[in-house]
Structures are given as C-alpha cells and as structure tokens.
Image (cartoon, rainbow, N blue to C red):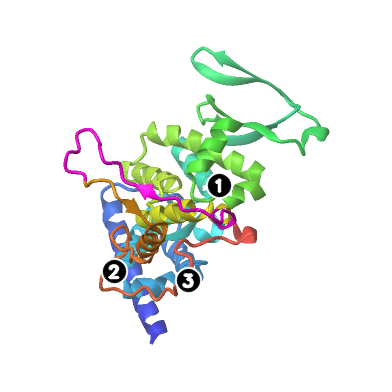
Amino acid sequence: MSNDLTQVTQRSLDEQVIGNLNRLQEQGLEMPPGYSPQNALKSAFFELTNNSGGNLLQLAANNPETKTSISNALLDMVIQGLSPAKKQCYFIKYGNKVQLMRSYFGTMAVLDRVTGGAEITPVVVREGDVFEIAMDGPDLVVAKHETSFENLDNDIKAAYVVIKLANGKEVTTVMTKKQIDKSWSKAKTKNVQNDFPEEMAKRTVINRAAKYLINTSNDNDLFVQAAKDTLENEFERKDVTPEREEQAAVLEEKLFSNNKKAVDQENDNERITRVDDVPEQPDIEQAKPIEKEDLMKTAEQILEEPVQETLDVMAGYETNQKESEPDVSTIEEDDYPF
C-alpha cells in the first residue's frame, strides 16, 4: 500500500513540475544545452526515496505541506538546470519541509551559466604562505601567492576564488578565515566543515562570489531567483526546535548545575524570597519564603509541559516519523557532494 502511495505521489509531482516548467519556458525560460529535466527528475525521485531523512516521497503522500515543499524544490532544481545524478544538488528535510541544497559542483554549474562559460579557480591560503592582495582601480586582485609542499598540512588562514569571465575580465573574491568561520556558523551543515575544511572553504568563497554574480546577472529572472533562493537555503534554516524546549533546557541546567554543592551543604536552609518593593510595580505580592522543594516541583512541571506552539507541523497529518528519528536529515561523509 505504501509503495502504491509513493508511486502515485511521484507521478503527481512529476506532472506538476513538468507542467509548471513548460509554462515557464513559454514565458522565456531557457534550459541549458543538453539538459534533460525528465532525467534530472528521475534521479531526484531516487534520492528523495532513499534520503537519509527517510523516504521523503512516502512522507509527502501523507503530508500536503511536505509534498508542496518537494514540488517547489524540484522546480527550483530544473529551473537551474541541476541534477542529483551529477552531485550538483541534494535534498534536506527540516521539520515537515524539504529544501533544495546546491553543492560545490552545482554552484560551479550555475556560475558557468550565469557568466556564459567562466573559468573558476578557487584556492585556499595556509599558514606560512606568502599572500598579498592589491587594488587594480576599484577591483581587488591577488598580487602574490607563494606556497610550498611543507605548508599543505598547515591551518587555513584565507581562501579566494578568481573567476575569469568570457569577456576576459577577472573577478576576485577573498575571504579571511574569520569571515569563513562566521559564514560556517550560520550554515546548516556543521560537522562536514571540520572533516573537509579545504573543500568547504573553497565552496564558501565560491558561494560569496556567486551571490554577487547572480545578483548582477541579466539572465532570466526566474532562473536568477531560483539560484538566489537555493543559495539562501544554506544559511536561512527555519528553526523547527521549539523555543520553550530550549528555555526548559536552560532552566534545567541552572537548577541542577549546583546540585553537588547543595548535597555537600548539610545545613542548607536557604530560602528564595520575592522582592517586596519593586519600582513601578505596586501590585506585586508581598515577600514570602519559597521552599526550594516547591521550586524544583514547579520546574519539573514546566519541563513536562507539551511543546506545540512553535513546531513547524500541520495539525491533522501524520509524518510516519518515529520519536527517535532526528528531525533534520543528515548526509553520510562518503556521500557529501560539497
């Protein structure tokens, strides 16, 4: 039964995306030469079915919100001319929504399309390298970069990318390690930066350059908007973790961090007292002692309260997700496409 629902959902998504794409092409959207939207969709459906976050097509069969987000992600994919089979993009589940993420190779493909066939050369700068930048009129350029074999294992201190456009002009983007770290702190993928720092540093500086080139592109507006949206997906994760759950965790930590100290103090008769005179608060109740045991019970009640108001879930629909399963899908290290 579940397989039948998955197949029905796949056919529905396929027809919906191809139908929307045909209408966009009638409005002037052009596909890259040799790109087959049908083949790209086939590989996308395979990844959605075998996603690390579960069978996303099966989830979509039971949740209209998930299905709508997948449809939008697939349309963004074909508008940009990307294919999961070429490791140019992949899909990540956040709560009940699925977003398209563009890989290093996907960003290179989009830049190639935006610039009309530019040469893109990303480079990392390591501790010990001789690295100098300069200004050529209003443009930033790399004046000197010398490295050695001994420096290859040193820490990264910067990264830059040189993009040579079809008209011969070179566009250089440089990021310091501090800027890279700041970008990583906002990104959705955390652990992979520690495992593959060089590749991720290159990817980050390419994304920085891509943002400028995409925003200044005179390409089709639909393509440009899809490219911008996918780039922003990497940094604008919608928080699906309930705020009250975070507050409860903080409260729990504060209440129990000094638990050992309280046990050691045999004659601890400390009382917590409300302030009886607060400016501009005439109606505050008079001071009275609060037993620590009462406070602990109140804290436990807060922690046990159900948290629903900030969850990104539509009422009335089942996601078939077990409680033990993470709400955010992950990518295996060997499969990470950068």
Q: Name the amino acid, label 3.
A: Gly
Foreground mark, 3 or 1, reads 3
Residue at the (37%, 73%) spot, across then down: 319
Q: Quadrant of residue 60?
A: bottom left
- Above or below: residue 66 compared with residue 116: below
Tell me how far mark 2 sits from mark 1, CA to CA: 31 Å
Locate residue 280, reporting x and y percent. Answer: 19, 34
Direction right: furthest residue: 150
Whichever of labels 2 and 1 marks the residue nearer the N terminus, that label is: 2
Residue to which mark 1 is pinned:
104
Of residue 52 and residue 12, the one placed in the foreground of this image is 52
Amino acid type, label 1: Tyr
Judge left or right: residue 270 versus residue 319.
Answer: right
Do residues under tags 2 and 1 come within 8 Å of each other at their CB atoms? no
Q: Of the residues shown, which amino acid type is indicated by label 2?
A: Pro
Q: Which residues are magenta?
A: 262-284
Q: Is residue 268 one of those drawn in magenta?
A: yes
Q: Position of residue 226 (x, y in %)?
A: 37, 47
Residue 255 placement (x, y as % from top left): 46, 54
Could you tell me which quadrant the N terminus lies in?
bottom left
**Mark before the other along the chain sequence, 3 or 1:** 3
Q: Which residue shows up at 46% across the image and 59% down it?
A: 92
Q: Which mark is residue 54?
A: 3
- Helix, strand or loop status at disc 1: helix
Please state the horizontal and vertical placement of residue 34, each as a whole percent of the image.
Answer: 48, 54
**Which secondary structure, mark 3?**
loop
* Dot 3 and dot 2 residues touching (CB under 8 Å): no
